[in-house]
Amino acid sequence: MFVPDNDVSLLVSSILLTSISTIVVFTRLYTRVLVIKNPGADDWLMAIAVCASMSFMVVAIYLVRYGLGASFGSIPPENLEKFFHGYWATVPLYNLGLICCKLSIVCQYRRGVSRLTEASACVTSVIRLISLIPASVPNNEVDTSLSGVDAAMWSGIEVNAAITCASLPTLKPMFDRLFQTSSISHNNAECRTSGTDEQSQSRNCSVFHIGRHFVCTKIMEWKNAHSNLKRITSHPEVGLTNCLGVDDLEVASRQEQAHETV
């Protein structure tokens, strides 16, 4: 299917922004229903709004398929009826999505809502109204199919921007819990690492003390051996027998007995 150049921006913005708003709303419902277990009317109204936005995206793709963005005169006669049906369907879907989104924001005031939400929705609404001027002014020279591209694109942007901006503040409890869980896991990991380090230090100290005792023992043995060697050198008879554990007096007695025998 050939897609006119001016339809590319419509398709990209519709698919991208509708996907983002859908993910945000599903995350919102998960947070309210499963995390804090406190869903409200604002959540269900926003769910209806995002369903209307997804339907609007489908109709926009349908319109491109049957002539939106091409010159009105180039649309085949057999496609005109489908084209007008799709063109008409965009109006209630747009209104449904925007009304449910605004009602959700009103209900959300009871929980608290950021002023940035209103500001973002107002900016896109103003841009959309400007894009509707060429298509709404009676003029035989205005091509409805060509001028309808900007109107459809900004209508989708307005609804999706309002849905996303109104839903983002509701995700705070989920992110707080995620960060809290991440912090606890990090602290536990640090504790385990600290415990392991302490055990390693304890083992290292034990090895050090054992090694030091071994070295000291060997030094003492070497000193004793050196001392005995000096005694043997200076007093051969006494020194050697002392090394063998014989008392000096016993040695002297044996020497006297040997002289008497001779």
Image: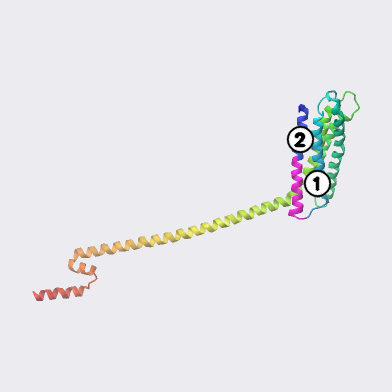
Comes first in the chain, label 2 or label 1:
2
Residue 234 horizontal side relative to residue 64, left or right = left
Name which residue lies at 19% across and 75% down.
250
Q: Is residue 123 visible?
A: no
Name which residue lies at 48% across and 60% down.
202
**Magenta part of the protein: which range?**
19-37
Q: Are marks 2 and 1 in contact (CB under 8 Å)?
A: no
Foreground: disc 2 or disc 1: 1
As displayed, is residue 136 above or below residue 171?
A: above
Q: Secondary structure at mark 2?
A: helix
Q: Secondary structure at mark 1?
A: helix
Q: Nearer the viewer, residue 221 or 184?
A: 184
Magenta-colored stretch includes residue 100: no
Q: Position of residue 193 (x, y in %)?
A: 55, 55
Graded by Cα atoms within 10 Å as few (under 14), some (14 to 19) or many (20 or more), the crowding at tag 1 reads many
Identify the image quadrant of the C terminus.
Answer: bottom left
Q: Amino acid at mark 2?
A: Ser
Magenta-colored stretch includes residue 26: yes
Q: Which residue is mark 1?
A: 47
Q: Is residue 195 visible?
A: yes
Q: Which residue is mark 2?
A: 13
Q: Amino acid at mark 1?
A: Ala
Q: Nearer the viewer, residue 85 or 234?
A: 85
